[in-house]
Image (tube, rainbow, N blue to C red):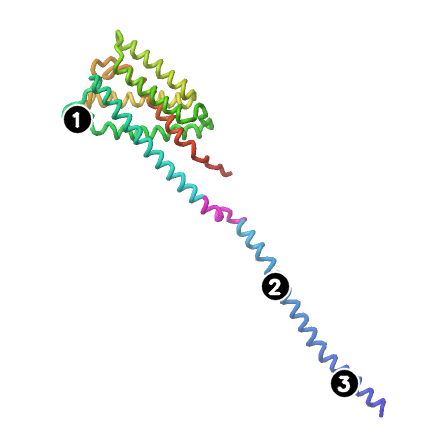
């Protein structure tokens, strides 16, 4: 009887173990699979983020690029307004000096301002000053030769004073002939460039501005918009290109000084 009971007990225990073993094994396998899925998802998500950021590197810099472009455009507009105001003021003052000395004569039908000049002269000079003042630093950066000679506002103010003095000399000084006056003003204009600029870009732009402005002046005088007294160079005075050259150098120095605080745009490969 005891052997029969022991055999029955051992059979029942073995059966219970066989019934428990598949359940326990399946539960363990399921837990292992869940753990592997969780670990793979956790480990793959940073990799996916890294790979996505590597595929789209520009998406992270869109905000900074937009803000920098807005700041740059705002700075260009501010510099343009300052240069326009400076050019307009210099045109009013210097044109008044030329008219008082009867160097420049406007027809009576176009005189409509307190300075006895045409209304379009100051806006045109202001627009030209804005274009020239923005062009000088752009040419410097394009050539890779930043202008560093006497970069302070005191030097710019002295340059403006010399330019006004050259214009004043063209109206006040009396020489035996216009050739002597033209040579004197040419020497003063080159001295202004050598004293306050000394850059190849400044010399080239000054000569180009003098040539283009002289052609425009010739066209306007030829069409009777206004005239000069005692013209000796076709329809104008021979010293006028010297005034345009020194004016271009002066406005260019103002534009360079205004652009000093603008950070350089980083180059991207």
Find the residue positioned furthest to the left: 109
**Whole-percent x and y of residue 235?**
23, 17
Q: Are marks 3 and 1 in contact (CB under 8 Å)?
A: no
**Whole-percent x and y of residue 66?**
42, 44
Assess disc 2: are there few (<14), some (14-19) or many (≥20) residues with their C-alpha within 10 Å of its C-alpha.
Answer: few
Quarter of image, res 100: top left
Assess disc 3: are there few (<14), some (14-19) or many (≥20) residues with their C-alpha within 10 Å of its C-alpha.
Answer: few
Assess disc 1: are there few (<14), some (14-19) or many (≥20) residues with their C-alpha within 10 Å of its C-alpha.
Answer: few
- In the picture, measured across the screen, residue 28 lies left or right of residue 209, that is right
**Whole-percent x and y of residue 20?**
71, 78
Magenta-tinted stretch: 54-64
Residue at the location (39% across, 21% down)? 204
Residue of label 1: 111
Q: Is residue 245 visible?
A: no
* Majority secondary structure in the magenta region: helix
What is the distance, in whole Å, between disc 1 and disc 2 at their CAs?
86 Å
Q: Earlier in the sequence, mark 3 or mark 1?
A: 3
What is the distance, in whole Å, between disc 3 and disc 2 at their CAs?
39 Å
Tag nearer the camera, 3 or 2: 2
Q: Quarter holding the N terminus? A: bottom right
Tag nearer the camera, 1 or 2: 1
Q: Earlier in the sequence, mark 1 or mark 2?
A: 2
Question: Is 117 or 20 nearer to us in this picture?
Answer: 117
Tag nearer the camera, 3 or 1: 1
Quarter of image, res 124: top left
Residue at the location (20% across, 25% down)? 115
Q: Which mark is residue 12?
A: 3
């Amino acid at each position: 009887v005891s052997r029969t009971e022991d055999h029955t007990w051992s059979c029942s225990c073995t059966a219970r173990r066989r019934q428990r073993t598949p359940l326990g094994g399946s539960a363990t396998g399921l837990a292992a699979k869940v753990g592997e899925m969780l670990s793979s998802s956790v480990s793959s998500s940073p990799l996916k983020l890294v790979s996505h950021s590597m595929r789209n590197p520009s998406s992270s810099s869109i905000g900074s690029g937009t803000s920098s472009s807005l700041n740059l455009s705002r700075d260009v507009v501010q510099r343009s307004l300052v240069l326009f105001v400076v050019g307009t003021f210099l045109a009013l003052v210097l044109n008044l000096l030329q008219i008082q000395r009867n160097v420049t004569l406007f027809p009576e039908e176009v005189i409509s301002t307190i300075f006895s000049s045409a209304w379009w002269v100051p806006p045109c000079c202001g627009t030209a000053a804005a274009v020239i003042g923005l062009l000088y630093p752009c040419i410097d950066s394009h050539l890779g030769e930043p202008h560093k000679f006497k970069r302070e506002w005191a030097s710019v103010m002295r340059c403006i004073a010399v330019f006004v003095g050259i214009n004043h000399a063209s109206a006040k000084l009396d020489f035996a002939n216009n050739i002597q006056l033209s040579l004197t003003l040419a020497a003063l204009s080159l001295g202004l460039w050598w004293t306050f600029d000394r850059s190849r870009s400044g010399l080239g732009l000054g000569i180009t501005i003098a040539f283009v402005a002289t052609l425009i002046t010739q066209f306007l005088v030829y069409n009777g918009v206004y005239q000069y007294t005692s013209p000796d160079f076709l329809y104008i005075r021979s010293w006028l290109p010297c005034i345009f050259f020194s004016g271009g150098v002066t406005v260019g120095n103002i534009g360079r000084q205004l652009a000093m605080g603008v950070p350089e745009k980083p180059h991207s490969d």
